[in-house]
Image (tube, rainbow, N blue to C red):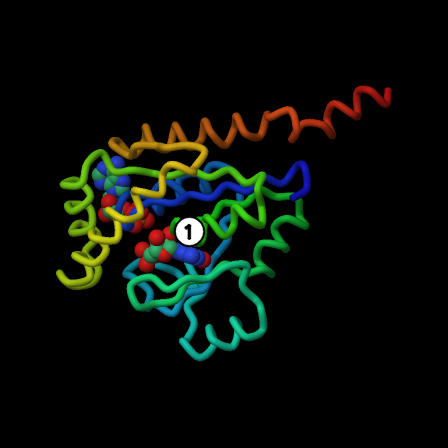
Amino acid sequence: MSNDSLMMVVSAPSGTGKTSICRSLLREFASLRFSVSLTTRPPRRGEIDGRDYHFVTAETFREKIRAGEFVEWAENYGHCYGTSRVVIEAIRLRGEDLLLDVEPRGARALKEIYPDGVFVFVLPPNLEELQQRLRKRGDGDEEMRRRRFQKAKDEIREVFWYDYIVVNDVLERAVDKVRGIYLAEKCRRERQLGVVASFLEK
Ligand code: ADP
Ligand code: 5GP
């Protein structure tokens, strides 16, 4: 990573609220760009192709795996999801910051490649509330919700290697915390060396 381009990866069990948090931050910070993943899952109500995901067929996804176009990819709930190398590189080249919404296995792979990335895990206040939110979102059938809930419990075991843990009880408060992490990480000494150097040159 270049010193001035920050990569922030947000993971959370499905239904916790990471899409809501990410959308809020993206509205607020023009310098923060979402790494739009590719997926073979069909769009949910309100999702826009190219903004939320690039929705592609299973055949297209397989071709892209063969062509090495993914930094990482994984299968979740019978559908494939992948982070595009081209999308990430384009954002980095422009010197913008990257926001990624990726489940723990994908996040782990990203940490190997980008060790100076910032890894944030969002937790629901409790498991009952997570079940409520999965219902509220209203996509998929009962069986799909049950699978997402089971997977959530496995994913929560992954929190220990993340840099930050944010509980999403009240959405605005969770956004405040992730905003705080983003701004503090931007101010880290190693990301400000360019600014410091400009003073020393004078
Ligand atoms: P994820 O992207 O983690 O799957 P979403 O952002 O889609 O989760 O949120 C799942 C559902 O929970 C949505 O209906 C959303 O409006 C709701 N939600 C998100 N955060 C909160 C919160 N803090 N309190 C109550 N409902 C929330
Ligand atoms: P959803 O179907 O709810 O949008 O996403 C399901 C899961 O896939 C979420 O945990 C989300 O973080 C994850 N996901 C989204 N994009 C990617 C990606 O590019 N790579 C990986 N590994 N997971 C992703």
Amino acid at the residue labelled 1: Val
The residue under label 1 is 102
Residue 51 visible from this viewpoint:
no
Residue 136 percent across, percent down from the top left: 17, 49
For label 1, the SS is loop
Label total for image:
1
The quarter holding residue 11 reads top left
Residue 84 percent across, percent down from the top left: 54, 61
Residue visible at 16% across and 51% down? 135
Residue 47 visible from this viewpoint:
yes
Residue visible at 21% across and 59% down? 139
Instruction: Judge: label 1 CB < 8 Å from ligand 2.
Output: yes
Residue visible at 45% across and 49% down? 107
Quarter of the render that holds ligand 1: top left
5 in relation to 45, above or below: above
Q: In which quarter of the image is the C terminus?
A: top right
Question: In the rendered view, does 38 fall on the left or right side of 71?
Answer: left
Question: In the rendered view, does 56 fall on the left or right side of 66?
Answer: left
Q: Residues within 10 Å of mark 1 (few under 14, many from 20)?
A: many
Residue visible at 58% across and 46% down? 114
Residue 46 percent across, percent down from the top left: 31, 58
Q: Which of 75 and 171 is in front in this view?
A: 75
Q: Quadrant of the N terminus?
A: top right
- Furthest residue in direction bottom, as rendered: 59
83 in relation to 34, above or below: below
91 in relation to 67, above or below: above
Residue 87 percent across, percent down from the top left: 57, 58
The quarter holding residue 54 reads bottom left
